[in-house]
Image (tube, rainbow, N blue to C red):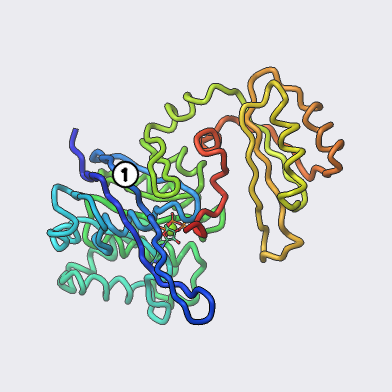
Amino acid sequence: MNPVIEIENIEKIYRKKSRKGLFKRELIEVRALDNISFNVEEGIIFSLLGPNGAGKTTLIKILTTLLLPTAGKARILGYDVVKEGGKIRKHINAMLMGERSIYWKLTGYQNLEYFASLYHIPRKVAKVKIDKLSEKLDLSDFINRKVETYSSGQKFKIAFAKSLLNDPKLIFLDEPTATLDPRAAREVREIIKQLNDEGTTIFLTTHNMNEADELSDEVAILDLGKIIEIDTPENLKEQIHTSESIVIDVPFIELRSKDKLLSDIRSLSFVSDIAYSQVVNGNGNKGEEKTKIRITTSKEINLSNIVNLFEKNSIPILSINQEKISLEDVFLSKTGRLLSEDTSKRV
Ligand SMILES: Nc1ncnc2c1ncn2[C@@H]1O[C@H](COP(=O)(O)OP(=O)(O)OP(=O)(O)O)[C@@H](O)[C@H]1O
Ligand SMILES: [Mg+2]
């Protein structure tokens, strides 16, 4: 066993001033990371899975030496994140802001040339390197066009190429597929797997449980700044002694009117967990909002019992689907909430 990341009791508290009334200001503390400890072994794909506001980006920023922890220790490739940042940055790379980390007025090639110069890579060596990356990531069709003309998948690929310029042993990817369409996201997942096959350790964050499931050798589930589970996706799913999940979409309904329905469903003998979240489609208009209800069940399920309860409570069903147990159910069983819930507004 050879850990490339060692995290011991890391804590991060953000302090910010907020206005209270007209003249008063109060200091608000947000505990973004609460006593985190785990190791990541060399050569694996490791995913940090958690809802909005869980603390994923905060942890990645600490591990990539962009942010100091409030307390605790972390070592990357054996180097201390607080005292040996320079050594760490030489051997790792990170993609934190995706397409926003490259210059849109330059071509893809000019971007890579510029960032190679920041690593003091001689021009000739950089050219060979960029050509290799272009071949590997299939950039040749667009690398000589200005970035502003690219699709988001193409922008992503240049940002990704940028993060490979120093041949990192370990790469951090913060929500690599969040802004991509499904086809580009699939392509990116293939690139991540290929890179890992070639020996690069991958640390990624996501709030997409299918992505974590598909890609990862190991998953840590982060919620409200705490690690609640850490294991292989298979082991995590095995913990749940249920067979299926039912996902029901209904038109947006206010919290108050849902209480009765939820307690009715909860009292059915085959139901083990239930949670819901508001899902916004498309441009975020209220009219586009849905409420997604997820019910984890045991084997002897009776679907019509559930449907009847919606009728009884006069709530129309937009769609109803049975799904295999996923990491979403693991999250639900541990927290009583869904991964799609936004936890960033907590204080
Ligand atoms: N600079 C900051 N000042 C104050 N609070 C912050 C700051 N950055 C993050 N936070 C808070 O810390 C918590 C964790 O934020 P973080 O960005 O690490 O979460 P995340 O898991 O990356 O979320 P997301 O999925 O939305 O990217 C949130 O409650 C967030 O509002
Ligand atoms: Mg984030």
Choose between 293 and 268: the one closer to the eye.
268
Q: Secondary structure at mark 1?
A: helix
Quadrant in which ligand 1 is drawn: bottom left
Residue 322 shows up from this direction: yes
Question: Left or right: 19 with respect to 135?
Answer: right
Report if the beta carbon of the residue with label 1 is closer than 8 angstroms to ligand 2: no
Foreground residue, 334 or 91?
Answer: 334
Vertical relation: 320 (above or below) 114: above
Residue type (three-letter) at the residue carrying disc 1: Asn
The residue that appears at 77% across and 51% down in the rendered structure is 251
Residue at the spot x=26%, y=54% of the render?
63
Residue 30 horizontal/vertical position (percent): 40, 59
Answer with left or right where residue 228 lies relative to residue 88: right
Task: Judge by depth and name the residue closer to the eye, 200 or 344.
Answer: 344
- The answer to which of 144 and 297 lies nearer the viewer is 297
Q: How many marks?
A: 1
Q: How far across and down, in percent of the image, does residue 209 sit?
A: 50, 42
Local packing at callout 1 (Cα closer than 10 Å; few below 14, some 14-19, many 20+) is some
The answer to whether 30 is drawn above or below residue 266 in the figure is below
Could you tell whether 180 is left or right of 116 in the image?
A: right
Q: Classify the position of the N terminus by image quarter.
A: top left
Q: Classify residue 2 as left or right of residue 274.
A: left
The quadrant holding residue 2 is: top left
Residue occupying the point 17% across, 48% down? 77
Q: Which residue is mark 1?
A: 196
In the rendering, at what x and y percent does residue 298 appear?
63, 21
**Camera sees residue 178:** no
Residue 246 screen position, x and y as percent: 68, 33
Question: From what the image shows, is residue 26 above or below residue 244?
Answer: below
**Height in image: 27 above or below 307?**
below
